[in-house]
Image (tube, rainbow, N blue to C red):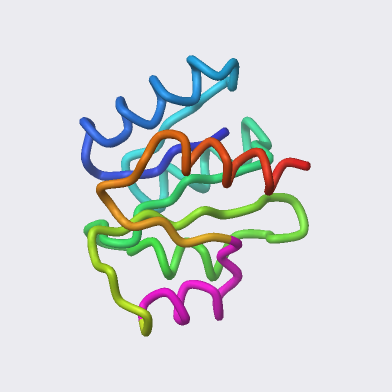
Amino acid sequence: MLVVDDDEMIRRLVRTVLEADDWTVVEARDGPEAFAQLESTDPAVVVLDVMMPGMDGVEVCRKIDHSRVKVIMLTARDDPALERACKDVGADAFLTKPFSSLTLLDLIEDLSA
C-alpha cells in the first residue's frame, strides 16, 4: 500500500488506519517520491492526494501503470468535475476529506479483491 500526500498528518492517519488492518504501508510526500516508491515496492493500491505542490495527484494518476495498481484519490474538494477528471485519468475511487476510516478500508478491500 502506498500513501501519497504532502500533509504529514494525513499520511500518518491513513498509515495508522491501514496498519491496524494489517496492511504494509509505505509513504511518499509528492509525485516524484511516489514514482520512486512505485518502482521499489510494487504496491497493489495507491492512496493519492489530489492537491499537492509541483506534480498534482491527477498528473501522478495519469502516469501510473493502472494494469499494476489501483488508485484511490483523496481530496478536500467535493467537486463532481474533479471526480470525473480523476476517473478519466484512471482513478478507481474518489474519497473526500474528511473521510471515514471504515469507508477507506471498504474501498481498499473492494479494489484488492
Q: Position of residue 74 (x, y in %)?
A: 37, 54
Q: Which residue corresponds to the image point at 21% horizontal and 31% vertical from the top-left?
A: 9
Taking depth in this image into account, of 11 and 81 the one nearest to the observer is 81
Q: Residue 105: x, y in percent?
A: 53, 36
Q: Is residue 12 above or below residue 78?
A: above
Residue sitting at the far bottom: 81
Residue in view at x 42 percent, y 24 percent: 17
Q: Report the predominant secondary structure element of the magenta stretch.
A: helix
Pick the residue in front: 34 or 71. 71
Q: Is residue 102 magenta?
A: no
Question: Can you give x and y, in whole percent of width and height, for residue 26 in the image?
Answer: 49, 27
Figure quadrant of residue 14: top left
Specify whether residue 83 is painted magenta: yes
Residue drawn at the location 46% of the way across and 35% of the way down: 102
Identify the image quadrant of residue 39. Answer: top right
Question: In terms of depth relative to the viewer, which is nearer, 20 or 50?
Answer: 20
Query: Measured from the top left, where is residue 104 in percent x and y?
Result: 48, 41
Question: Where does the N terminus fall, quadrant-wise?
Answer: top right
Q: Residue at x 21, y 40 (%)?
A: 7
In the rendered structure, which segment of residues is drawn in magenta?
82-92
How many numbered discs sit on the rendered protein?
0
Give the position of the C terminus as an image quadrant.
Answer: top right
Looking at the image, residue 101 lies above or below residue 95: above
